Amino acid sequence: MLTVIAIAAFVLLLIGVPMWMIFLVLAVSAMVWQGVSMEVVVQGLTGTINNLVLLSVPGFIFAGTVMGRGGMAVRLINWISAFLGRVPGGMALTTVSAAELFGAISGSSAATVAALGNVLSRGLNSLGYGERFSLGLITSSGAIAIIIPPSITMILFSVMTNASVGRMFIAGIIPGFVVGACAAVYCVWYAWRHKVASERTWSAAEMLRTTREVAWTLGAPLIIFGGIYGGFATPTEAAMVVSVYAVIVSVYIYRDLTWKDVWAITHETAQLSAKLFIIVAAAGVCSWILAAEAVPQTMVGFIEGLQLSPWMVLLLINVILLVVGMFMDPNSAVILFAPLLWPIAQHAGVDLIHFGIIFTVNLAIGMFSPPFGLNIFVSCSIFRVSSSRVVVSVIPFFFAYLIGLALVTYVPSLSLFLPGLMKD
């Protein structure tokens, strides 16, 4: 049965059937095939999404969309550029830094590319970075948003493995900067190699002006992290508060959005959240089927029989997840594969939080990996170029991110240092 499910899923994926529909059809079909009553099927579908933490997902999606369309992204770019513009490779570094900070607001890779893409592309091209470099940098930088908290992928990982969302969030901070630093090093080298001039000067007046303009934008991550780690709010409560804050700032302070725009964003958020929850529900049933067939135990036994060292087990997991990321979006992948791969990592002595960050970084790379990396298609839509041009442009950044992945995988303290400072 599992072989039939795998083949059917691959065929449906190739012909363009949405992932949520693939999970739903295969999950229900498998349950019916096994003679399970529809009552149990319904219980299985609803059981996975019966989790309070998941309510934070639409909140973060809504807040990120409001901020992206409400002019906050542009103010963020201008502020970072005022400080980094004169540094060699300054505009490229601004792109990476803007992705880091906007990721701390939106939690969505595709939303980061969409919000920052046009503005940053014009700046990069005007300074002579070239279309290929600009495409690759913007497409890949958006992936950092998955690693930097608040991350929707981390929330789903926590739901599927019972990990602490708060620990997952704080654990992603250092790895997010490490991966960004790997991309930044390549950016500086590229600017030096191709003699790309910054054509900017530092201006105290500009720094002060842009700081005043961006102050309300920077309040969003302060609310999220201050609320969660100050003990004032759960991740779900923080998501709701920052959503209200984003609307107030965008409508009444910056005045870049109207209430009509807010209603349109609310409608889009509802649709996207519904699709995501369908994926969670259906993939949860798929995970139940795999558990019933003892697939995780079989995989652990197989790995144990190979007598691999822990670092080889982690290498194998990385390879599996990199391949998975090429064909599946992170949300679907984490729901289906986290319950399968966690027992293997646990058997190798890997900490749950460390494994969660490894999982997240792999799927972040998958966001711009061909053939189905979502960021590739977002860039194609924004810049109106073919997918082949985008794929070629991300190759150097793919290897830069792999270096970051290796550091995160084999230096556990990068992921575990900050969670270790938290009180239980």
Image (cartoon, rainbow, N blue to C red):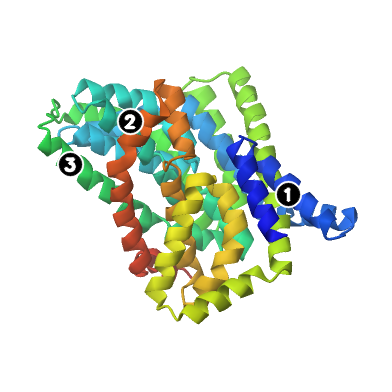
Q: Nearer the viewer, mark 3 or mark 1?
A: 1
Any part of residue 88 in sight? no
Q: Circle 2 — which element?
A: helix
Residue designated by label 3: 188
314 or 371, nearer to the observer:
371
**x 83%, y 60%: residue:** 34
Local crowd at mark 2 within 10 Å, few (<14), some, or many (≥20)? Answer: many
The amino acid beneath tag 2 is Leu
The amino acid beneath tag 1 is Leu
Q: CA distance from mark 3 to mark 1?
A: 47 Å
Q: Circle 1 — which element?
A: helix
**Looking at the image, do the residues carrying marks 3 and 1 touch, with CB atoms under 8 Å apart?**
no
Q: CA distance from mark 2 to mark 3?
A: 16 Å
Residue designated by label 1: 26
When the figure is inspected, residue 169 is found, relative to residue 137, above or below; the finding is below
Image coordinates for residue 45, horizontal then vertical, percent: 77, 52
